[in-house]
Image (cartoon, rainbow, N blue to C red):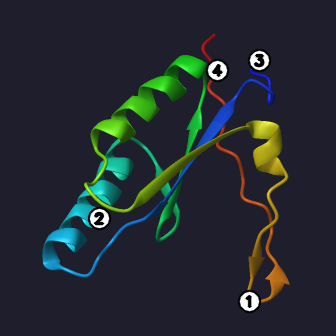
């Protein structure tokens, strides 16, 4: 069984310039690249993905780095599944229910 202290999450946050048509295309291409490698949109410029191992996390960070747009700022946060469970969410000024973690993979 996987431990919530070993399972990791990647959270990609970015602030990209979108003033010109070229910049908007670069920002959209970056969003699509994140979705293509399995990230889900949390907010317009925040994407998250579950990682089963340190090796997978390193591979994903490399893929993100190879798809970085030329401008703006991109930050990648890494934290455990246990820390992910403790995220506080608010919607419309009220506390929202916590997001459900994906089902764990069973190999045997």
Q: Which mark is residue 92?
A: 1
Q: Decide which of tag 1 and tag 2 comes sooner along the chain.
A: 2
At horizontal 52% and vertical 51% (from top left) the residue drawn is: 75
- Mark 1–mark 2 distance (CA, rounded to whole Å): 27 Å
- Distance from Cα at disc 1 to Cα at disc 3: 37 Å
Q: Position of residue 108 (x, y in %)?
A: 63, 10
Check disc 1 and report its element: helix, strand or loop: loop
In this rendering, the count of numbered labels is: 4
Q: Earlier in the sequence, mark 1 or mark 4?
A: 1
Question: Residue 104: percent from the left, percent from the top?
Answer: 67, 31
The residue lying at 37 percent from left, 49 percent from top is: 34
Bin the neighbour count of mark 3 within 10 Å (Cα to Cα): few under 14, some 14-19, many 20 and up: few
Secondary structure of residue under mark 4: loop
Mark 1 vs mark 4, CA separation in Å: 37 Å
Q: As rendered, which of 57 and 101 lies closer to the eye?
A: 57
Which residue is identified by label 4? 106
Task: Report which quarter residue 29 is drawn in.
Answer: bottom left
Q: Are marks 3 and 4 in contact (CB under 8 Å)?
A: no
> Where does label 3 land, which residue?
1
Which residue is the extreme one toward the top?
108
Residue 38 in the figure: left or right of residue 98: left
Sequence order check, earlier mark of 2 and 4: 2
| Mark 1 vs 3, N-terminal side | 3
Look at the numbered disc 2 and give the secondary structure of its residue.
helix
Tell me, yes or no, whether the two marked residues, 1 and 2, touch with CB atoms within 8 Å: no
Q: Quadrant of the N terminus?
A: top right
Q: Which residue is mark 2?
A: 27
Q: Nearer the viewer, mark 1 or mark 4?
A: 1
Residue 19 place in picture, x, y as percent: 25, 82
Observer-side mark, 2 or 4, equals 2
């Amino acid at each position: 069984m996987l431990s919530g202290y070993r399972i990791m999450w990647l959270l990609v946050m970015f602030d990209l310039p979108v003033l010109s048509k070229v910049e908007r295309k670069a920002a959209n291409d970056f969003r699509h690249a994140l979705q293509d490698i399995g990230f889900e949109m949390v907010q317009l410029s925040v994407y998250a993905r579950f990682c089963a191992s340190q090796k997978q996390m390193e591979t994903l960070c490399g893929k993100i780095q190879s798809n970085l747009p030329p401008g703006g700022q991109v930050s990648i946060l890494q934290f455990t599944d246990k820390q992910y469970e403790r995220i506080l969410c608010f919607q419309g000024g009220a506390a929202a229910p916590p997001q459900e973690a994906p089902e764990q993979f069973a190999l045997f």
